[in-house]
Image (tube, rainbow, N blue to C red):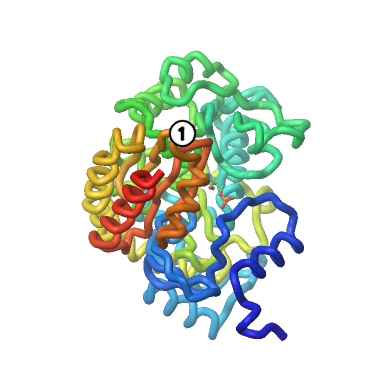
Amino acid sequence: MRTDESLHTAEAVRDAERWTPHNYHPLPVVIAEAKGAWVTDVDGRRYLDCLAGYSALNFGHRHPQLIAAAHAQLDRLTLTSRAFGHDMFADFCRELAELCGKDLVLPMNTGAEAVETGIKVARKWGYQVKGVPADQASIVVAEGNFHGRTTTIVGFSTDPDARDDFGPYAPGFRIVPYGDLAAIEAAIDDTTVAVLIEPIQGEQGVVVPPAGYLAGVRRVCTARNVLLLADEIQSGLGRTGETFACDHEGVVPDLYLLGKALGGGIVPVSAVVGDAAVLGVLRPGQHGSTFGGNPLACAVGTEVVRLLATGEFQRRSAELGARLHAGLRDLVGHGVLAVRGRGLWAGVDIDPALLTGRQACERLAERGVLVKDTHGSTIRLAPPLVISAAELDHAVAQLGAVLQES
Ligand SMILES: Cc1ncc(COP(=O)(O)O)c(C=O)c1O
């Protein structure tokens, strides 16, 4: 039995390091409770959460509507497996399909599973519909991608940390520079079944491609009979000020790959959403998941879709995002080299002569603001879409103060 006295950050960090492999290097913040945009650690310190679980917490911590849906479902039915039907499944699939303007929804659990599902569907579509010779299917992906951690996915990562020593790697992927439409066109041939792309590369540092790129990729895919798979796992569901990041260029992919915020910060829920002409290639026994589309996931996921259907969160993200970016731009020349992003999502390049990204995150945490570094001196801000203007101003002011004292 632990005493309250022992529930302190240093001990909790030590215990965690003792009992788990070090595949993460978390900030020394051990969270015990959370509500909305705020978290409280085991020592009672409060922090403004400006990472939001890499967008898994778009609606903030414990959004009342989502928690109520989860509670109600927990009291009734939690898991059936897909061997049987359940009474929450159809509504979830229908409402998510309608949000996406597509025919069908295939629910999975994690983002990586959604990506794997998209790859499998694209290959099967390639063989059965496009007529690609057996086992020849190729998929075009972008440098700097992050699509998850499975063995197939890390095989086409260009990040040595993610990829090295996990081979042999699955063949069938062609890597081209991100943002380079001509390179995609050149990489496509008769074996190509899909282009798999993040509309904004989050893990790479919130990298926004040049204007017209996504629309160009859509055009090329249509012209060459190649599926466009948009990994909107981090960029989708309100994060960028639209329902999907693809919306900014009026682009509709063949498959949306969704995750993170779809689970409302409560359960892992992912999905592949597309039309029957594509997703319809799957027959019984060819793909599945014990937990995919379980009743609890569907109950929460349906409420997530209903929150998004109001448009309120997309609006908040657009309006507050403009405020965030204006505030961050004011720091350029004062310790910030560059700011990128869209909506409530920003990648900030800190002057490496001042601080590493990690140091910036540590100093911000000391000032009660949580963000995450990536690739050297870049930090990422993705606050929950329920954050207030005053809270957002506070976060930017704290970053300014950190830079000023460095
Ligand atoms: C764009 C993108 N795709 C896929 C994933 C993988 O999701 P998960 O960690 O749920 O497997 C992530 C996770 O960060 C992501 O950002």
In the rendered picture of this protein, how many numbered marks are placed on residues?
1
In-image side of 52 versus 306 (left or right): right
| Amino acid carrying mark 1 in the image | Pro
Locate residue 214, reporting x and y percent.
37, 30
Q: Quadrant of residue 218?
A: top left
| Residue wearing tag 1 | 352
Which residue is located at x 49 percent, y 22 percent?
Answer: 177
10 Å crowding of disc 1: few (<14), some (14-19), many (20+): some
In-image side of 338 versus 380 (left or right): left
Q: Quadrant of residue 65?
A: bottom left
Q: Quadrant of residue 132?
A: top right
Secondary structure, mark 1, is: loop
Q: Quadrant of the N terminus?
A: bottom right
Locate residue 179, reporting x and y percent.
42, 24
Q: Residue 273, can we see it?
A: no
Q: Residue 31, can we see it?
A: yes
In-image side of 245 versus 106 (left or right): left
